[in-house]
Amino acid sequence: MQAGSPTTSPAVVEQEITEHIIAAKIRLRFDKSALRLVGGLKTALAEAIPEGHAVIFTVTAPVLRRAKTAAALEALVRAGLPTGEVRNTIEDNDVRLRLVVDVRAHMPRVLGFVHNPESDAAVILALAVSKLLGRN
């Protein structure tokens, strides 16, 4: 199966995005707390994101108050994000959210990344948006 083909699953696309971010020398976090935060939000928000849209979020590590951070992120998304980027601090973590429109149907609707504080969240978002919109 070719990357980027219409039959590519959201999980494969998400893995490709993660590989691009890691190749750009950005340190992502995959500890238990980070995986639970991202996984929980993907599950909670999957049905809230309309077809043709996607939400990407980044959170700086360490995530010390995961449940409160997740609840606040979920509330932000459900309140309706403007097209573009939202920056916020939630429970001492820098957070960025970006709503992406005109996303093909086979792309993931919710993508989340936990990264080290010195990593550039703007690069993470740019790489993810580029892939979601089929630019790479």
Image (cartoon, rainbow, N blue to C red):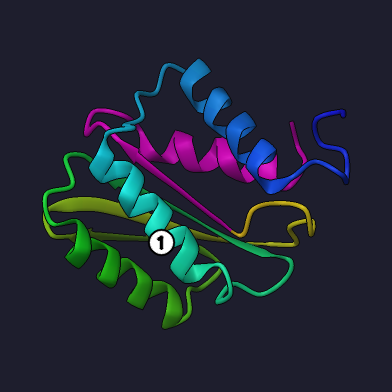
Vertical arrangement, residue 72 with respect to residue 13, above or below = below
Of residues 135 and 113, which is closer to you in this image?
Answer: 113
Residue 61: name its quadrant: top left
Residue 27: name its quadrant: top left
Residue 111 forms part of the magenta stretch: yes
| Left or right: 83 in relation to 107 | left
**Residue on which the image places disc 1:** 41
Q: Position of residue 32 (x, y in %)?
A: 26, 39
Residue 92 forms part of the magenta stretch: no
Q: In which quadrant of the rendered image does the C terminus lie?
A: top right
Amino acid on which disc 1 is placed: Leu
Residue 46: name its quadrant: bottom right
Vertical arrangement, residue 50 with respect to residue 43, above or below = below
Q: Is residue 72 visible?
A: yes
Question: Residue visible at 58% across and 74% down?
Answer: 47
Vertical arrangement, residue 83 with respect to residue 91, above or below = below
Q: Which class describes the residues within 10 Å of circle 1: few (<14), some (14-19), or many (20+)? A: some
Of residues 45 and 32, which is closer to you in this image?
Answer: 32
Question: Residue visible at 18% across and 66% down?
Answer: 68
Q: In which quadrant of the rendered image does the N terminus lie?
A: top right
- Range shown magenta: 110-136
Q: Secondary structure at mark 1?
A: helix
Q: Position of residue 121 (x, y in %)?
A: 38, 39
Q: Position of residue 20 (x, y in %)?
A: 57, 24
Vertical arrangement, residue 106 with respect to residue 80, above or below = above
Question: Residue visible at 64% across and 42% down?
Answer: 11
Question: Residue visible at 24% across and 28% down?
Answer: 118
